[in-house]
């Protein structure tokens, strides 16, 4: 079992306990990964409740929720005087029908193809800071400091749960988040250690800010008639690492003793890749009536399920935090969970632990909760004390505001890097060259408008420390820039209009927004020469 010597005193690694002054600032919140319903798991609720708490504690700060169209209406109720929604395009990115694809190809030859409008850039929003509660810095602009939240590095611990493409995408996303952020926030100390070990990040750039959102369920409704009177409870989407199958097997072993004929196991949560196999397993084990698949439930129903259960059982093989533990403990309910990843950090001595893959041990622990005098009550009391020790959402929001303020005051040095280009040379709407030269020097940049562009003309607005200009490129043209740069840090930015999205015009899987191609990028100063890679993703 993992170390739980922190007892009932959770450890918080925060820069300050003083709420900073962010008055007059605008913070863009990157919610572009947000999906309808339960697809994001607990991270969705964490992000939205946190935004509301941040805005309440910083009433003179504006928060812009950049989101896709399929959650636009869902987020309407989260707007306040200083929280506003901002459209960041559509989802899923539309793929045209075959007939439309042929027409788009013809229109592209004529320079008349038109796809959806590109998402706004941070400079269009007037943003002073980018906050990414879903890790991915989708809207990143190197001229604007960013804070990214890392929830876990599950793909590194269990690569078999992901396809090679999913693994590569996650690895790239997390590396960008860690390397580009001025400050990284991790949701547990376990997660923080994982980030430090995986990426070699300087410790002063990584904070652990633990979740403290469990009190939102303080006043649950009583469970309805469809809820059994005597049950263990597990709320989790049906994802592989949630390990529902082992719990169902453990429950079958418990029920073989036939001492609790009315006992049930209630599983709530959104559908996922293991749902149907878990239904089949329950049927095969003769548990059709005893295992209840409750589906996705709203917060009031969730609170009722917590309130009415015998105990919470969390058999997960991996958690970046483990919010259900706090939610159950906040209601004085006993907790049984695996000893994996961050769970002992959350549960401390207020939980009963077992190995995630040991069904007999899990069944034995459930039996102890049913039969051992005083055990369930003692764990419930310890859990309630521990939940109180974590504090409230206002405390968490204060820690996040301190982190945001620190990032704003101490933006990450960017060094010599090219941002906004892809490994194949294509650049997006904004191409940025970050330079940090030892002496006055030059930037030599060559851009190309491919002959196959879906529009006849591209306009490139170039801004560098010495001035600005607008260049027009027809299809097939090359733009060669030779710009003077000062000694020290500087940014050169090229904004391209229009841009296009291959998927929305012609179908396929390429959802990128593309403008021009980068052929070369060279920084030179006395005694210094650096050819930047054409990727912008390293």
Image (spheres, rainbow, N blue to C red):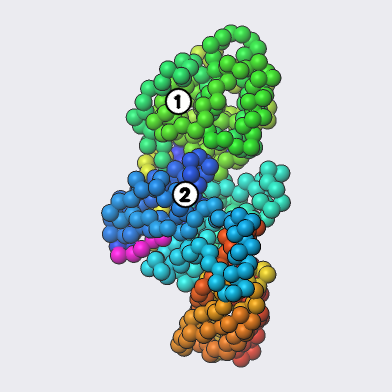
Is residue 136 in view? Answer: yes
User: Considering the image in quadrants, where does the C terminus appear?
Assistant: bottom right
Report x, y in % for residue 251: 62, 20
- What kind of element bears circle 1? helix
Q: Main secondary structure of the magenta part?
A: strand
The quarter of the picture where the N terminus appears is: top right
Answer with the quarter of the image where residue 126 lies: bottom left
Q: Which mark is residue 253?
A: none
Q: Is residue 402 left or right of residue 91?
A: left
Q: Position of residue 494 (x, y in %)?
A: 52, 78
Q: Which residue is depicted at the point 28% across and 54% down?
A: 81
Q: In whole angstroms, how far apart are the C-alphas of marks 1 and 2?
A: 29 Å
Residue 70 is labelled as: 2
Tell me the quarter of the picture where residue 503 sits. bottom right
Secondary structure beneath label 2:
helix
| Spot occupied by residue 118 in the image (x, y as percentages of width and height) | 49, 65
Which region is colored magenta? 24-29
Determine if residue 421 is in view: no
């Amino acid at each position: 079992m993992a170390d739980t010597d922190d007892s009932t005193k959770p450890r918080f690694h925060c820069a300050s306990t003083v709420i900073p002054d962010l008055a007059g600032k605008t913070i863009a919140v990157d919610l572009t990964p947000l999906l309808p319903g339960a697809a994001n798991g607990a991270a969705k609720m964490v992000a939205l409740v946190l935004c509301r708490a941040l805005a309440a504690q910083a009433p003179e700060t504006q928060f812009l929720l950049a989101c896709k169209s399929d959650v636009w209406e869902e987020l309407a109720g989260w707007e306040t005087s200083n929280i506003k929604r901002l459209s960041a395009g559509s989802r899923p990115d539309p793929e045209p029908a075959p007939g439309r694809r042929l027409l788009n190809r013809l229109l592209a030859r004529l320079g008349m193809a038109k796809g959806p409008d590109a998402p706004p850039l941070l400079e269009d929003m007037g943003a002073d800071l980018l906050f990414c509660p879903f890790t991915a810095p989708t809207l990143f602009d190197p001229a604007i400091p960013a804070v990214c939240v890392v929830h876990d590095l599950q793909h590194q611990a269990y690569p078999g749960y992901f396809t090679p493409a999913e693994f590569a995408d996650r690895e790239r996303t997390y590396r960008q988040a860690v390397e580009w952020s001025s400050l990284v926030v991790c949701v547990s100390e376990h997660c923080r250690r994982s980030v430090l070990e995986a990426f070699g990040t300087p410790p002063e750039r990584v904070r652990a800010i633990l979740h403290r959102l469990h009190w939102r369920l303080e006043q649950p409704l009583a469970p309805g008639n469809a809820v059994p009177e005597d049950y263990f409870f597990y709320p989790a989407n049906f994802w592989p690492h949630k390990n529902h199958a082992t719990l169902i097997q453990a429950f079958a072993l418990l029920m073989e003793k036939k001492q609790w004929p009315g006992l049930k196991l209630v599983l709530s949560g959104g559908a996922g890749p293991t749902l149907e196999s878990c239904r089949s397993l329950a049927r095969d084990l003769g548990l059709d009536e005893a295992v209840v698949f409750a589906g996705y439930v709203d917060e009031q129903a969730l609170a009722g399920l917590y309130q009415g259960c015998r105990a919470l059982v969390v058999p997960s093989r991996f958690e970046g935090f483990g919010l259900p533990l706090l939610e159950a403990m906040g209601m004085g309910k006993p907790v049984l969970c695996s000893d994996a990843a961050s769970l002992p950090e959350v549960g401390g001595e207020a939980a009963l632990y077992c190995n995630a893959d040991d069904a007999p041990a899990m069944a034995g622990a459930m039996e102890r909760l049913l039969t051992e005098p005083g055990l369930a009550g003692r764990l419930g009391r310890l859990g309630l004390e521990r939940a109180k020790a974590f504090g409230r959402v206002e405390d968490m929001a204060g820690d996040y505001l301190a982190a945001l303020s620190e990032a704003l005051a101490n933006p990450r040095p960017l060094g010599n890097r090219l941002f906004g280009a892809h490994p194949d040379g294509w650049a997006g709407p904004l191409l940025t060259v970050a330079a940090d030269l030892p002496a006055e020097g030059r930037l030599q940049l060559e851009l190309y408008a491919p002959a196959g562009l879906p529009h006849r003309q591209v306009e490139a607005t170039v801004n560098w420390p010495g001035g600005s200009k607008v260049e027009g490129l027809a299809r097939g043209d090359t733009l060669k820039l030779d710009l003077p740069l000062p000694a020290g840090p500087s940014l050169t930015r090229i904004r391209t209009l229009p841009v296009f999205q291959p998927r929305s015009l012609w179908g396929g899987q390429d959802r990128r927004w593309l403008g021009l191609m980068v052929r070369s990028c060279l920084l030179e100063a006395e005694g210094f020469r650096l050819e930047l890679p054409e990727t912008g993703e390293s």
